Amino acid sequence: MARCTAPVRGHRTASGAAACPVCGSRYRGYRSPTYSSSPYPSSGSSRGRLSSVGGSGSSRKPRWSPAGSSVVYTPAEVRTLTPVRENVEKRASLPSVRDVFLCHAWDDRNGAAKELHDLLESRGVSVWFSEKDVLLGSTLLREIDKGLAKSRVGIVLVTPSLLRRLKGEGIADKELSALLARDLLVPIVHGTTYEALRDVSPLLGSRSGLNTTEDPMANVAAKIAELVTL
């Protein structure tokens, strides 16, 4: 009489159970289940890639943003500011260098430009600002050249007044030409749009930057302060 082999050989595997003269008929044809994928997404899955990159409306923390900072960046802002930050780091060893050169329209000197200047300086950022750095009797263009040469990064405050100045190819246009020649320029659109800027200056309009329509001026200043702080 056939006897079950489980007490001696065990039925730990399907093949072992199938070899048993008593239990084999129940296990023949049995195959252990296989799974085509894990129930959890792998690091290489599309879901994993999406979460690491972030979609529109998501936020990312750039490597230069200090731990504990509450400043929020969009992925587009991180992409835009990263090459500027790299140039800031390359210029870290230059002596007597200002953190920021503020390019603005003359009509904004006591308005939006002054507000941005004050916000930056309140965060410890040294700013080249024509209202305080160009002395009476000095040559404006010469002082601007020196300011550009001794600044780690340039920011241009794009306002309706600046757009009018650019159409006239004034001093602001000369400042922008020098800044555009290097990857050291961050446009800040205020009270206007990038579409309006591209109509006047396609080259400057091709540069992404910051926008006070999306962020208050205080938040824009916070991002610039983190960008230039070493």
Image (tube, helix red, strand yellow):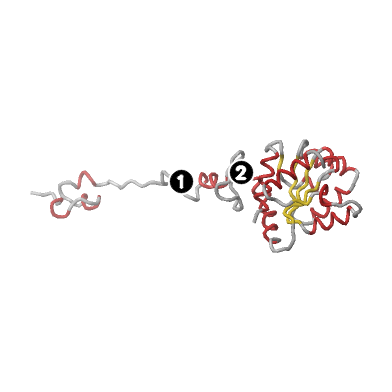
Could you tell me the amino acid type at mark 1?
A: Pro
Residue ID at (79%, 59%): 149
The image shows residue 178, relative to residue 168, as above or below, that is below
Q: Quadrant of the C terminus?
A: bottom right
Q: Residue furthest left?
A: 1
Q: For the residue carrying disc 1, how many other residues have a C-alpha within 10 Å: few (<14), some (14-19), or many (20+)?
A: few
Q: Secondary structure at mark 2?
A: loop
The image shows residue 192, relative to residue 20, as above or below, that is above
Could you tell me the amino acid type at mark 2?
A: Val
Nearest the eye: 80 or 178: 178
Q: Which residue is mark 2?
A: 71
Nearest the eye: 90 or 24: 90
Residue ID at (74%, 55%): 98
Nearest the eye: 76 or 107: 107
Image marks 2 and 1: residues in contact by CB distance under 8 Å: no
Q: Which residue is mark 1?
A: 41
Q: CA distance from mark 2 to mark 1?
A: 30 Å
